[in-house]
Image (cartoon, grey):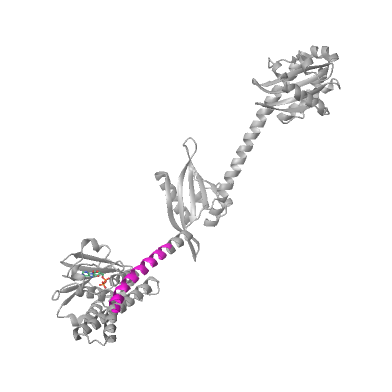
């Protein structure tokens, strides 16, 4: 028997995996006698797999399978004891075969059985060996236990490495720049896209404090982000411009979040950085597209009315002529003057649309030159000399003792619009006041009237394109609703602002102001 234990223990030296124990056990019994044949059953919950000793005949393996199917294993009652099959005749394959089972248990769970078939003549030998056989079972189980723990450990390590590799892969391939700082502000993650966005190699920053690794400008940005993230917990799309070269700046959006472990303990801060150029461009194009379709629908609406009037008047005149009918002189004059009015309105509309389109497309440049404001206002109101009797205009200029840098031609357009509106929307005899002053760092002009005023609910949109107040008082007043939009654009090009104060049925004040930096003061 010693030979079995020796042969088995020797084999243990070469075993690395639990599976190899089954083969070693099956082979060890063959050492005693050539007529012995043995297999090991690898038991896995309800199934088993046969591991035969080497060189064992296929037919004999099938015989053992047969015996197993007939319930031979039911004879195992003690997990630690060898069983010598008593009704061996029932399972015998050869005349004088005897059979024993060596159960293999690990922590009360059966993981295998050694089935040994031997000739009757070896019965005494096996009877004497019972103790040693049990010992083999115990050694095998201990060894199985050991390998099992090592296998599990290896499996866990592999799983952990796999997970780590997978995570590292995700971090590297995330479409945004990903940066992580630990609690000491050391950079622990700096992925490929972060390298591209910030133009820094990860090897130059990993393991270093961001204050030491980033440029001064970037440190200032990260200082703000770190401070606010620690207060707020997270930040969404903080935007700043990254200067990659004197001529290349890209808008960067950074979202941050505090990194917590599974116990909720603070591990650092994570930064998700993205190049916003594309998003901004897409938004700009979307906005442009929306503006275009709004514009087209508004313009087509504004064009339809005058064309309808012209069409019906012309049709009436033509029909009368074709029928050889003499039309009433008054009717003919009225029709022709309606056509004339609408054509004037159309050409005004087209001029306004074109001016607005030119300004909006950025094709209009502001050419600032020193302007004497008093002269500019007086030369502008000369245009309205013809209205002197119906709408007297008074001008007061205060506090302006030097020339101001502005584009006089463009500012004149704004003044003309404000003044002509004041005339259009106030009754005859009602005066108009123009007031200009310097207030702080602003040059300010207001045009006031005592006219029909603007209802409160219309005030906030009065500078919008095609915004017109449609009330009985304005029904007969022609206009395009574009003049104030043009004014607003012109003043915006001067970095200034426009406004309107109005009381319905009392009067309105339209104003604009232009900032005067030291550069725009001209003496
Ligand atoms: P419009 O060609 O219709 O006058 P504007 O853009 O100049 O176009 O003005 C838009 C609308 O603002 C006008 O239709 C009118 O309803 C209102 N509005 C402008 N100026 C005055 C004003 N001084 N008094 C009352 N309403 C005004």
Q: Residue furthest front?
A: 323
Answer yes or no: is residue 141 visible.
yes
Q: Which contiguous range is marked in magenta?
A: 286-311
In percent of width and height, residue 385 lies at 19, 82
Q: Is residue 246 left or right of residue 291?
A: right
| Magenta segment main secondary structure | helix
In percent of width and height, residue 83 lies at 74, 15
Please count the marks in the image.
0
Answer yes or no: is residue 370 visible.
no
Depth order, front residue of 519/165 = 165
Depth order, front residue of 471/452 = 471
**Where is residue 373, by image quadrant?**
bottom left
In percent of width and height, residue 166 lies at 59, 44
Quadrant in which the C terminus is drawn: bottom left
Q: Is residue 405 left or right of residue 46?
A: left
Q: Is residue 253 above or below residue 402?
A: above
Quadrant in which the N terminus is drawn: top right
Depth order, front residue of 118/11 = 118
Depth order, front residue of 8/229 = 8
């Amino acid at each position: 028997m010693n030979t079995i234990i020796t042969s088995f223990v020797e084999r243990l030296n070469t075993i690395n995996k639990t599976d190899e124990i089954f083969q070693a056990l099956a082979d060890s019994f063959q050492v005693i006698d050539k007529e012995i044949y043995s297999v090991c059953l690898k038991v896995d919950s309800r199934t088993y797999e046969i591991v035969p000793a080497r060189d064992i005949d296929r037919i004999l393996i099938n015989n053992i399978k047969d015996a197993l199917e007939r319930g031979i294993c039911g004879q195992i009652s003690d997990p630690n004891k060898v069983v010598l099959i008593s009704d061996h005749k029932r399972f015998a394959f050869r005349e004088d075969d005897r059979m024993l089972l060596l159960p293999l248990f690990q922590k009360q769970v059966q993981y295998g059985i050694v089935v040994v078939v031997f000739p009757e003549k070896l019965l005494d030998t096996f009877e004497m060996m019972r103790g040693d056989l049990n010992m083999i079972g115990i050694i095998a189980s201990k060894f199985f236990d050991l390998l099992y723990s090592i296998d599990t450990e290896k499996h866990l390590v592999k799983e952990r490495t796999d997970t780590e590799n997978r995570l590292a892969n995700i971090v590297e391939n995330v479409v945004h720049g990903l940066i992580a700082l630990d609690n000491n502000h050391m950079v622990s993650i700096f992925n490929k896209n972060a390298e591209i966005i910030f133009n820094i190699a990860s090897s130059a920053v990993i393991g270093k404090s961001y204050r030491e690794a980033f440029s001064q400008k970037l440190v200032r940005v990260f200082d703000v982000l770190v401070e606010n993230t620690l207060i707020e917990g997270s930040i969404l799309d903080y935007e700043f411009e990254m200067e990659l070269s004197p001529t290349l700046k890209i808008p960067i959006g950074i979202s941050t979040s505090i990194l917590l472990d599974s116990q909720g303990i603070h591990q650092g801060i994570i930064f998700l950085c993205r190049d916003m150029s594309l998003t901004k461009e897409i938004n700009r194009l979307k906005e442009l597209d929306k503006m275009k379709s709004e514009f087209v629908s508004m313009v087509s609406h504004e064009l339809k009315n005058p064309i309808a009037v012209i069409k019906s008047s012309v049709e009436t005149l033509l029909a009368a002529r074709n029928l050889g009918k003499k039309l009433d002189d008054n009717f003919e004059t009225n029709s022709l003057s309606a056509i004339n009015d609408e054509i004037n309105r159309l050409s005004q509309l087209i001029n306004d649309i074109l001016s607005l389109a030119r300004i909006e497309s950025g094709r209009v440049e502001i050419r600032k030159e020193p302007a004497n404001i008093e002269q500019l206002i007086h030369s502008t109101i000369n245009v309205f000399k013809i209205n002197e009797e119906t709408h007297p205009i008074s001008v007061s200029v205060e506090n302006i003792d030097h020339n101001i840098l502005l584009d006089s031609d463009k500012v004149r357009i704004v003044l003309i619009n404000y003044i002509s509106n004041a005339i259009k929307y106030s009754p005859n005899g009602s005066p108009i006041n123009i007031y200009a002053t310097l207030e702080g760092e602003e040059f300010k002009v207001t045009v006031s009237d005592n006219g029909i005023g603007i209802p409160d609910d219309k005030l906030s949109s009065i500078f919008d394109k095609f915004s017109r107040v449609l009330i009985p008082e304005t029904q007969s007043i022609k206009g395009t609703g574009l003049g104030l939009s043009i004014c607003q654009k012109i003043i915006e090009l001067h970095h200034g602002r426009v406004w309107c104060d109005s009381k319905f049925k009392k009067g309105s004040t339209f104003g604009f102001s232009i900032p005067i930096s030291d550069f725009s003061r001209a003496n």
